[in-house]
Amino acid sequence: MAAHRLPRGTSHDSRTASRAEPAGEPLFPLIAVLAGFGSALAYAITAVTEQLSTKRVKRRRALSPELLLDLIKQPLWLAGVVANVVSLALQVVALRFGPLALVEPILVCDMIFAGLISAALRKRADPVTGAGVLACAAGVAGFLVIARPSAGRDTMGFVEALPLLAGFAALLVGCLALARWNQTARPLALALACGAAYAVTDFSIKLATGQFSGGLSDLFTHWPIYAVAVVGPIGFVLNQSAFQAGTLPPVLAIITVTDTIGAIGLGWLFLNEKLSSGPAEIAGEAASLLVMTVGIVVLAHRSPQAAARRDQAPQPAGPADGEPGAQ
């Protein structure tokens, strides 16, 4: 990471720089962990407040501009927007000070926090949510304990990045082609492409944060910030398209799992981030990620986003004033 590096102009690699600053090294993962949990909590608040806000306004058709105008008048929705900005800022801080393999699993905790907050607001226990929380938490904790991820390098030239960018472009084209020609697979293909786009975006943010020490001039003379500006919006559009195309829980689960595991893989493959590599450790890491995935699938079915989609679904004719949003 950039904070570990020697002053500019030296020829030593990041390992040498890390040894040169042993006093600060333990602090950086701690900052990354705290910022990662803070980002996850802030995003969970965003998801819950968005779901509650949509229940307090009139139902509109999908992607209706009038819905946005209604929501802007809701202080709770505006608070969710602020929480979303805080979440993004803390994610950038976490990626600045920690490897992708450390930060990305922690960010999955947004689903845990959202499930717990939703259950607390309902004032009743939900065994399914509880099982999802336990599985997701156990998977994340198990992976981090077994893998013991450590930082690799924080720079990557554009020529080195070409295989990554070409691979993402090929995956994107393939998923879009599948989505066009196979309506059954359309939502899953779009979700897979969205998760991959988010993984590449997180990877690019990680690299962009390594340019912060050089100021804005240094940041804008390297490719990662432009990758964020291009691939990030692509991921957003794919996200909305995937949600429109299919049932939300499986789409949300695929996006989350692909984003998390994809970013971990990119950090290991391209940035030389270190994970425990013994046969037993690899088996434990794979098992932990599998348990985490099961938890994500369960929590996706109980997520605030899924609840909001159910609330906005067309209802049979009948009394509509009894909606919970009347509170």
Image: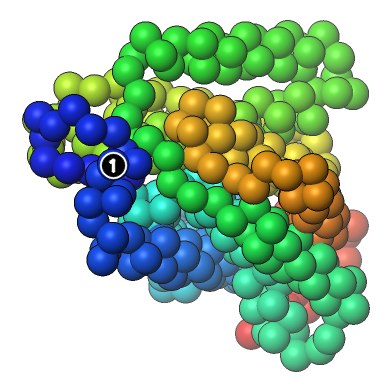
Q: Secondary structure at mark 1?
A: helix
Place residue 222 in its image quadrant.
top left
Q: Residue at x 17, y 22 (%)?
A: 221
Q: Residue at x 25, y 44 (%)?
A: 17
Colour pattern: rainbow
Answer above or below: position of 16 versus 43: above
Visible in this render: residue 21? yes
Q: Pinpoint residue 265: horizontal percent, then vertical percent.
A: 61, 34
- Quadrant where the C terminus is found in the figure: bottom right
Q: Position of residue 241 (x, y in %)?
A: 65, 31
Q: In the image, what residue occupies the spot 61% across and 29% down?
A: 196
Residue 239 shows in the view: no
Question: Front-most of 168 and 20?
Answer: 20
Viewer-proximal residue, 52 or 301? 301
* Kind of residue at badge 1: Thr
Vertically, is 119 above or below 182? below
Residue 25 location, quadrant: bottom left
Q: Label 1: which residue?
A: 16
297 left or right, relative to 259:
right
The image position of residue 137, as x and y in percent, is 72, 68
Q: Using residue 115 as the reference point, say whether residue 12 is left or right of it.
A: left
Q: Quadrant of residue 124?
A: bottom right
Number of dots carrying numbers: 1
Q: Pinpoint residue 18: horizontal percent, then vertical percent.
A: 30, 49
Question: Which part of the image, by quadrant, shows the N terminus?
Answer: top left
Measured along the vertical axis of the image, is residue 269 above or below residue 115? above
- Taking 116 as reference, is 3 above or below it? above
